[in-house]
Amino acid sequence: TDMTVLRDKVEQTDRFEHYGLTPREKEVAALLLAANTVRMIAGELKISQSTVNMHTANLYRKLGINSKAELFKKFGVAETETQAEG
C-alpha cells in the first residue's frame, strides 16, 4: 500500500470524525498502517522508540482503540495486504 494512500486515509478519518490527532500522531498512524515496527518508525522520524510508543498510546486513546488490529480496521486497511508487500 502506498504511503500517500495511507496518509490520506488517516487525514480523512481525522477530518471527518474530529479525533484531534496531531501531525506527528498522523505520521505514526500512517507508518503503523504500512506495517512498520516501532524501531523502523523511530528511525524514519528520527525520534526515540519510547517517543513512538507515547505517540502510539495517545493515538490509540484518541481513536478509542486498544490494538494495532483495531487501528487497521478503523482505517479500512487489510493488515495482510501491508504485510505481504513488506
Image: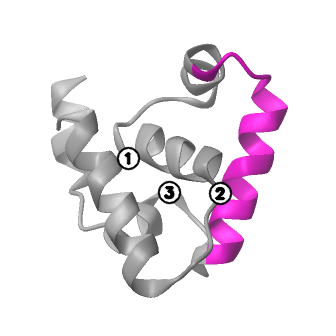
Residue at left 64%, top 62%?
A: 59
The residue under label 2 is: 22
In the picture, measured across the screen, residue 73 lies left or right of residue 51, that is left
Instruction: Kindly identify which numbered label has been placed on residue 51.
Output: none
Q: Nearer the viewer, mark 2 or mark 3?
A: 2
Check the image and report above or below for 49 versus 58: above
- For the residue pair 79 and 28, the one nearer the viewer reads as 28
* Residue occupying the point 38% across, 60% down: 10
Image mark for residue 33:
1
Distance between the alpha carbons at the discs numbered 2 and 3: 18 Å
Q: Which residue is mark 3?
A: 68
Which residue is found at the position 57% from the left and 78% from the top? Answer: 19
Labelled pair 1, 2 in contact (Cβ < 8 Å): no
Q: Where on the picture, by quarter, is residue 74?
A: bottom left
Provide the residue span drawn in magenta: 45-62
- Quarter occupied by the N terminus: top left
Name the residue type under label 1: Leu
The location of residue 46, given as percent across then percent down, is: 68, 16
- Element at badge 1? helix
Which mark lies nearer to you, 1 or 2?
A: 2
Task: Estimate the x, y position of residue 33 in percent, counting from the top left.
Answer: 38, 46
Which is more toward the observer, 69 or 1?
1
Quadrant of image for the C terminus: top left
Residue type pointed to by label 2: Thr
Q: In x, y percent, where is residue 42?
A: 66, 22
Q: Vertically, is 8 above or below 42?
A: below
